[in-house]
Image (cartoon, rainbow, N blue to C red):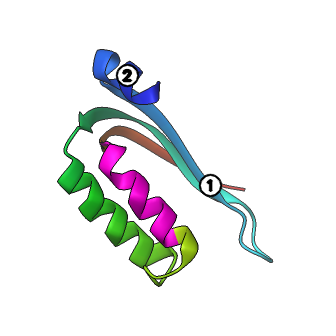
Amino acid sequence: VKARSLRKTHVAYFVIDIAPEGSPPLGVRGKCNAKVIDDPAFAAKITAHNIERYLGSPKSRAAKKIMAMAKDSSVIELVPTYMASWKY
């Protein structure tokens, strides 16, 4: 549903925030141009990279399950056009 919407509008908004322990919350928000890339091989490559980065091992059950979904996935490329940061 989100990819379908981005194919029509090509615009997305984002918010990334964190609240480090012992520090005030901070983050960034913005607007970006979005491009949906429907290439199963590229999606598998990006998925494998993210599994390695965030899960560590591609051999876990979770990693294998995520990798199996990659062939039916798209990649969404976001190119920021506006950003603002905050820190409380």
The residue under label 1 is which amino acid type?
Asp
Q: Which residues are magenta?
A: 63-74
The correct choice, above or below, for 1 with respect to 34 in the image is above
> Disc 1 or 2, which lies upstream in sequence?
2
- Number of numbered discs on residues: 2
Closer to the camera, 41 or 26?
A: 41
The location of residue 81, given as percent across then percent down, is: 31, 36
Q: Main secondary structure of the magenta part?
A: helix
Whether residue 66 is in magenta: the answer is yes
Q: Is residue 28 left or right of residue 50?
A: right
Residue position marked by numbered label 1 in the rendering: 17
Residue visible at 43% across and 71% down?
Answer: 51
Crowd tier of the residue under label 2, counting other residues whose Cα lies within 10 Å: few below 14, some 14–19, many 20 or above: few
- Could you tell me if residue 86 is visible in this image? yes
Front disc: 1 or 2 = 2
Label 2 sits on a secondary structure element that is helix
Where on the picture, by quarter, is residue 31? top left
What residue occupies the far top of the structure in this picture? 8
Report crowding for label 1: few under 14, some 14 to 19, many 20 or more residues within 10 A (C-alpha): few
Residue identifier under label 2: 4
Under circle 1, the secondary element is strand
Within the image, what quadrant is residue 72 found in?
top left
Residue 25 position within the rendered picture, expressed as x and y whole percent measured from the top left: 72, 60
Residue 43 is a magenta residue: no
Q: Is residue 73 visible?
A: no
| Residue 22: image location, x then y, percent | 80, 77
